[in-house]
Image (tube, helix red, strand yellow):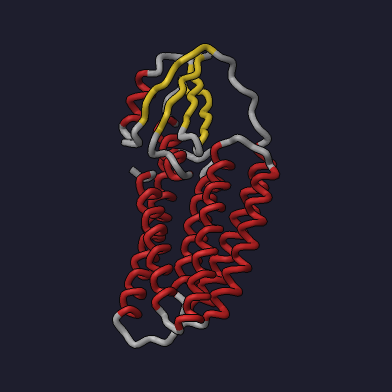
Amino acid sequence: MKKSTFIISRMDCPSEEQMIRMKLEGFSQVKQLGFDIPNRKLEVYHTEEILPVHQAISELGLSDKLRKTEETELPLASDESQQRKILWWVLGINFGFFIVEMTTGWISRSMGLVADSLDMLADSIVYGLSLFAVGAAISRKKKVAKMSGYFQMGLALLGFTEVLRRFFSEGETPLFQWMVIISILALIGNLVSLWLINKAKSEEAHMQASAIFTSNDIIVNGGVILAGVLVYFLDSKWPDLAIGGIVFAFVMRGAIRILKLAR
């Protein structure tokens, strides 16, 4: 058994991990993949020459570099059942807060909450893709990814349109109380998710990626809370529109990455 280690500069979230997994799925010589997303590292356990695998990875355009190839033993499989259970919980928390934030966002006229809800939905889609498509044919995975990506992109475009409409119209100031309270609850939900993920003490890529995504969500929650506070002190809708536009940009970026899976 051989292990080839790659440094992939543009691998920083579950989208790139899924792209690589789907790209290498047809290679019989690839026995296992080990992802270290924080360090942009990929370990490929294989039985034959690495050149065809390297060429396939390079086709993704993620700025890859083969560091070394060495003889090794295939590592033991991790406890997938526990990881699946935790990921289902994280998916449930994200999708639940998507519904709550979307509803309260429209009621309170806050684009920050609406955008944060779509960010939660984006994470739910990535987690759902990983869980739903396990063991499925590659054609099915690509179909699911394509549908999810276009759906998320459509929501992001609608969000940008609404931000621009409110920017150029005489809209009312959003209810900052809802912005702060709901964002604090979402922050608590993400902290619980991060605790569950860290509790698994797993070095598997999808668990590390989930931790990264959840940490990013916590930052977004903080941004919406700050925007709510500024809305109160400035008595203005501009902080809410600004944070909404920023988060919608992240949602669109995630949609584009998901669509790359369907190629």
Q: Is residue 221 left or right of residue 69?
A: right
The spot of residue 205 in percent (x, y) is 54, 37
Residue 132, placed above or below residue 188: above
Is 188 left or right of 132, judged from the image as shown?
Answer: right
- Quarter of the image for residue 50 reads top left
Answer above or below: position of 181 versus 36.
below
What residue lies at 35% left-to-right and 21% top-to-bottom?
52
Residue 174 x, y percent position in the rendering: 47, 82
Q: Residue furthest top?
A: 71
Which quarter of the rendered picture does the C terminus lie within?
A: top left
Residue ID at (64%, 56%): 191
Instruction: Give the residue drawn at x 43%, y 55%.
Output: 148
| Residue 166, quarter of the rendered image | bottom left
Image mark count = 0
Quadrant assignment, res 27: top left
Considering every residue shown, the one lying at the far front of the view is: 233
Front-most of residues 241 and 232 = 232
Asked whether residue 108 is in view, the answer is no
Residue 67: percent from the left, percent from the top? Answer: 42, 21
* Residue 118 percent across, percent down from the top left: 47, 64
- In this rendering, the answer to whether 175 lies above or below 225 is below
Q: Nearer the viewer, residue 125 or 63?
A: 63
- Residue 213 visible in the snapshot: yes
Q: Taking 186 as reference, is 33 left or right? A: left
Is 139 rendered above or below residue 150?
above
